[in-house]
Image: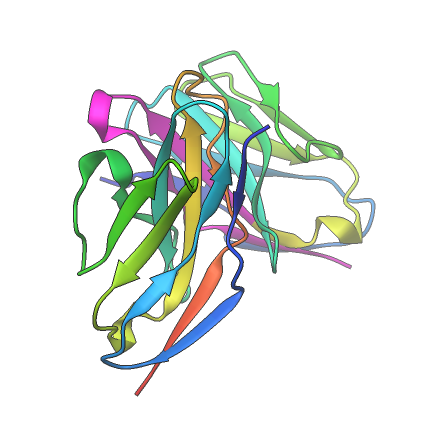
Amino acid sequence: AQRVTQPEKLLSVFKGAPVELKCNYSYSGSPELFWYVQYSRQRLQLLLRHISRESIKGFTADLNKGETSFHLKKPFAQEEDSAMYYCALIPARNYGQNFVFGPGTRLSVLP
Amino acid sequence: NAGVTQTPKFRVLKTGQSMTLLCAQDMNHEYMYWYRQDPGMGLRLIHYSVGEGTTAKGEVPDGYNVSRLKKQNFLLGLESAAPSQTSVYFCASATRQGMNTEAFFGQGTRLTVV
């Protein structure tokens, strides 16, 4: 079965400091991986997807198949980055079955 | 575009009462999902649908039923609410278009069962 883990429930950093939100997954095939963000009292929204190799709001994430990781990084955190972050995957060959979400990490950027 | 709309946004139920949550999407998506969000547990899939007239169980289906009579609507029913069903419920829809795979979420329904 597919599984996504995010080891940190809460991550606090100071404004301007680098931030890394960890995500590991277990899946025997080739998954598609995503980061979703939920700002206070808002709906979840897509932040970025690995297949696009994009950078959104200064965030990047690299898929490491050897370590089965998809960590989210930003070199200089901003206060507006404070939110709940969810890592998610879908099995590439079984689309429609499920988006599997991790438990989430709450990022708090301190002034 | 409205995207994904959930009704109601808030509800308080007494134990044993029933209710239906409505999810509507206007993006012509094939796939629709119902998740519950609980502290420390992330989002857990309750039921999902891969097309009109089809439904399937997710990770935590007990105590819930769903229906997808129309492509744009996905209903989640609680026949006899229990305090353990106190949660925030999110509906999502998705379509697969090459690199544009993405799940779009509703704003959530906060349900309290007393």
Which quadrant of the figure has residue B71?
top left
Number of numbered markers:
0
B60 to A29, vertically: above or below: below
User: Extreme bottom residue here?
Assistant: A111
User: Extreme right residue here?
Assistant: B16
- Main SS, magenta region, reads strand
B31 to A104, vertically: above or below: above
Q: Residue at horizontal 32%, vertical 68%?
A: A19
In the rendered image, residue B50, in percent from the top left (x then y), is placed at 46, 17
Residue A39 seen in the figure? no
Residue A96 seen in the figure? yes
Q: Nearer the viewer, residue B44 or B84?
A: B44
* Residue B35 placement, left or right of A41: right
In the rendered image, residue B32, in percent from the top left (x then y), is placed at 45, 27
Identify the magenta region.
B89-114
Q: Residue at horizontal 39%, vertical 31%?
A: B93
In the rendered image, residue B31, in percent from the top left (x then y), is placed at 41, 23
Q: Nearer the viewer, residue A71 or B6?
A: A71
Quarter of the image for the N terminus of chain B: give it: top left
Is residue B103 rendered magenta in the image? yes
Chosen colour scheme: rainbow
Is residue B53 rendered magenta in the image? no
Quarter of the image for the C terminus of chain B: give it: bottom right
Q: Residue at horizontal 50%, vertical 25%?
A: A28
In the rendered image, residue A22, in percent from the top left (x then y), is placed at 42, 56
Q: Nearer the viewer, residue B60 or A2?
A: A2
* Residue A86 placement, left or right of A15: right
User: Extreme front residue here?
Assistant: A66
User: Extreme top residue here?
Assistant: B53
Q: Residue at horizontal 46%, vertical 13%?
A: B52
